[in-house]
Image (cartoon, rainbow, N blue to C red):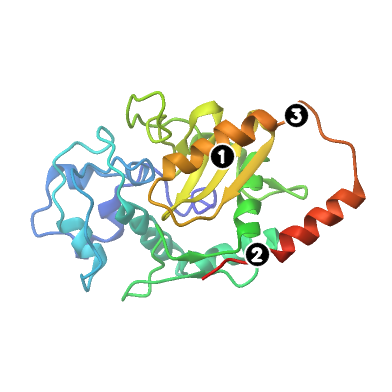
Amino acid sequence: LAVAEGKLSIDDRVSSFFPDSLPAEPAKNLQEMRVRDLLTMSAGHQDEVSLGRESDWIRAFFAHPVPHKPGTHFRYNTPATFMQSAIVQKVTGQTVVQYLQPRLFDPLGIQAPRWDANPQGISLGGYGLYLRTEDVAKFGQLYLQKGQWKGQQLIPESWVQLATSRQTSNGSRPDSDWDQGYGFQFWRCRHGAFRGDGKDGQFCVVLPEQDAVVVLTANTSDMQKELNVVWDRLLPAFAGQALPVDGESEARLREFCGSLRASR
C-alpha cells in the first residue's frame, strides 16, 4: 500500500531510510540491500539477525554481517520483516497498525487489531499481531480476490500477483511446502497454493484453483504434518462446483463452530 501511494519503491536501498543507524563503514552488500530483498527474505544474511536483547533494533540489524549479495541467497529472517515495518513507520509517520487501520482493517471489518512493538515503538512486523481466525480468513480471501473487497480495490492487483508468485528459490524438495519458492512475504505451496505462516502452525492457505481459503490455528512443532492433513484429507473433498444452499445444515454448522472452545 505504501508503494502504491508512492511513499517508497521496492528498489529503494534499505540504508537510505536510516543513514544515522549505519556502521561507520558499511559494507558494499549492506549498502546494496533493497526493500525488495527484505520482501523476498534474500537480504544477504547467512544467519538470522538476533534483535530481542538489543536496545536499538535498526542499528543491530545493520551491524549484522551480510556475506551474500542481496537478492541471491534465501534465508528466512524475521528481522527483515521488522525492517519493513520500520520503513513504513519512517515514511508515513505512523505505526503499521495505524497506517493499515483505515486502508485495510476497517474495510475488512477487523476490529481492535493489536501488534506488539519493540522498545522504539515500532510494530514488530514479523510476529506479535493478534487477530481472530475469521480476520485471518478475510485477509486470505482478499488475496484470493486479487485485492478486491466488496467492490473496492484495497490492494493493487499487480501487487497481489507479485507478492504471491515465486520471486526467489528456497529449495528443491518436491514434497516440502518450504521448498516451492517464496514471494513477497508469502510462501509458495504445493498444489498451486500460497500461504502466510505464523508461529507453531498458524496458517492462512490460499488455493486459487479451488477458489478457497483455509485458515488453521495450532500449537505444533511439525508444521509440515499439519499442512499434509490439508492436502491429504481436505483437498480431495473439494467439489467441482458449489454445493446447493442448505440453510438448515448451515445453521447447525454455525452453532457447532460457535460452541468450540480451546482447552487449557
Give the left or right position of residue 44, taking residue 25 as reference: right
Looking at the rendered image, the disc whose residue lies closer to the viewer, 3 or 1, is 3
Q: Which residue is drawn at 65% across and 69% down?
A: 111
Task: Count residues near mark 1 (Cα–Cα under 10 Å), then give few for <14, some for 14-19, many for 20+.
Answer: some
Image x and y of residue 216, in percent = 56, 50
Q: Is residue 184 visible?
A: no
Q: Can you tell which mark lies on residue 160?
A: 1
Which of pointers 2 and 1 lies earlier in the amino acid sequence?
2
Q: What element carries label 3?
A: loop
Give the left or right position of residue 250, taking residue 44 as reference: right
Q: Can residue 34 be seen in this view?
A: yes
Q: Which residue is drawn at 66% across and 46% down?
A: 141
Q: Name the residue under label 2.
A: 110
- Residue nearest the observer in this picture, 190 or 54: 190
Disc 3 and disc 2: Cα gap in Å? 30 Å
Image x and y of residue 206, in percent = 59, 39
Quadrant assignment, res 44: top left
Confirm or deny contact between disc 3 and disc 1 (CB under 8 A).
Answer: no
Q: Can you tell which mark lies on residue 24?
A: none
Confirm or deny contact between disc 2 and disc 1 (CB under 8 A).
Answer: no
Q: Can you tell which mark lies on residue 239?
A: 3
Task: Count residues near mark 3 (Cα–Cα under 10 Å), then give few for <14, some for 14-19, many for 20+.
Answer: few
Task: Count residues near mark 2 (Cα–Cα under 10 Å), then give few for <14, some for 14-19, many for 20+.
Answer: some
Amino acid at circle 3? Ala
Disc 2 and disc 1: Cα gap in Å? 20 Å
Q: Which residue is drawn at 24% across and 38% down?
A: 70
